[in-house]
Image (spheres, grey):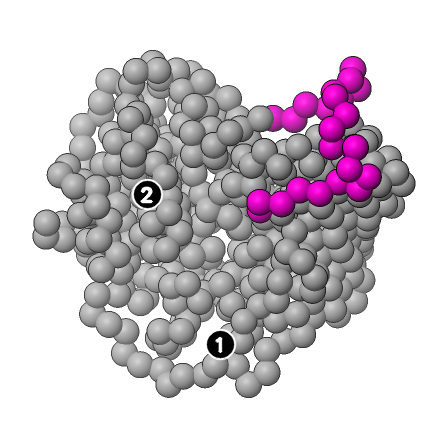
Amino acid sequence: MQDQAKTSSRDPEKKPESGSNIGRRKFLGRLSKGAGIALLAPAIVPRNVLGRGFLPPSDQITMGFVGCGGMGEGLLSGFLPKPEVRVLAVCDVDADHRVHFQKRVGKGCDAYLDFRELTDRTDIDAAVIATPDHWHTLTSLAAVESGKDVYCEKPLTLYIKEGRKLAQAVRRNRAVFQVGSMQRSDENFRRACELVRSGRIGEIHTVTTGIGGGPVIAFEPTAQPPERLDWNFWLGPAPVAPYSKKRCHFNFRWFWDYSGGKVTDWGAHHNDIAQWGLGMDESGPVKIKGKGEYPQNAMSDTFVSFEIVYTYATGTKLICTSQGENGVTFYGTKGEIFVSRGSFKATPEEIAYEPPDKDYVHLYRSMHHYQNFLDCIKTRQKPICDVEIGHRSATVCHLGNIAMRIGRELEWDPQKEEFVNDPNANRWIDKPLRKPWTL
């Protein structure tokens, strides 16, 4: 199949025309088109009120994929076999990626270079976002404001303030928004958090999250970007930078302009579980301090080793570290629980086998992260890792990076989402975007 990418030549600031007719399930449900990016007016009338409502269980869910690299590959493999899913479009600024995805999907799948061509389509129910982190909010906002539900990879954001803007847009549009912190749909992680929340190991005084250290990306000469890659579009809202193979695609994680290093890459998994176990899904720590080591003689610039100490209002401490075994450990006055992918250990062991009693806390149960998203599209319920949860968990990671970069302890107000009496630190919660991109 030839590449059918719709490579619009319009200015990035100019909103495209819609390219298809309104289907029966979309009747009036796409009036909230307040953004190409720049995002203009907020949606005034929630789309569910206007007629999208509940999808019949037998109805197919039409999807579009934005970002067709490594993470997108896994997401496509997860969603494509689902009988209720029909993939209508894929999008990537790398022609090799989008052609590969288009071939995998097969007949009836369009390919785009510009994500706005996909998000503007009125025949797509849901967008799956697997771009580099610095694109997560812009692409998600475009999808939400055009009436779509969204599955977005973690970490949800590049900086704190954009997460609040995204959460507000999701609520305003009554969208279903699932963040890809998939450990919430793993039984071991849910079980650990239930036991902790049920008091089985007593009062929690410490949680540790071991997430491993970051890599060092060695310098390489800059080069002309390959013809298949629109490098300027890849950079998007990030500062202008010369092309380097080691800077883009998977390695974007290790550059401040596009991500937050290992602290956000794996922290968005394990710190998310810590937040869940502590009952902090809509809150966070009040004090943060940390120390990190930068890479030496390297092109990458995010921390390669670190230890961050978060203190919650209860006095509980969360220690996120590059050292030790990968996983989450809850320490209580009566025992401890360790959980990681494929591993669960309670001390003493009998804690894990005591049957639930009347005080047992049953948490949201999802047996499959992708299926949970699809089910919630039909029921209009919040998924297990809703946008607010994803925003708060990403915020914990960003706070750690900010504290280490500033080099001192910071005091945080999780309700106001700002540092307390600290104008210098508050400059770090927002970030200017390269023109013409705006939120």
Where is residue 434 shown, x and y percent of the image? Answer: 43, 63
Please say whether residue 351 is one of the residues in the magenta stretch. Answer: yes
User: Nearest the camera: 223 or 374?
Assistant: 374
Label 2 amino acid? Answer: Leu
Label 1 amino acid? Answer: Ile
Magenta range is 341-364
User: Nearest the camera: 73 or 44?
Assistant: 73
User: What is the secondary structure assignment of the residue under circle 1?
Assistant: loop
Q: Residue at point 37% right, 30% down?
A: 147
* First along the sequence among labels 1 and 2: 2
The residue that label 1 is drawn on is: 217
User: What is the secondary structure assignment of the residue under circle 2?
Assistant: helix
Q: Residue at point 25% right, 36% down?
A: 87
Where is residue 378 shown, x and y percent of the image? Answer: 40, 20
The residue that label 2 is drawn on is: 76
Disc 2: CA contacts within 10 A as few (<14), some (14-19) or many (>=20): some
Q: Residue at point 22% right, 25% down?
A: 22
User: Nearest the camera: 232 or 349?
Assistant: 349
Please say whether residue 338 is one of the residues in the magenta stretch. Answer: no
Q: Residue at point 56% right, 64% down?
A: 261
Q: Quote the CA–CA distance across marks 1 and 2.
A: 28 Å
Q: Is residue 368 left or right of residue 126?
A: right
Q: Is residue 187 visible?
A: yes
Q: Is residue 75 left or right of residue 2?
A: right
User: Nearest the camera: 343 or 107?
Assistant: 343
Return the mark for residue 326. none
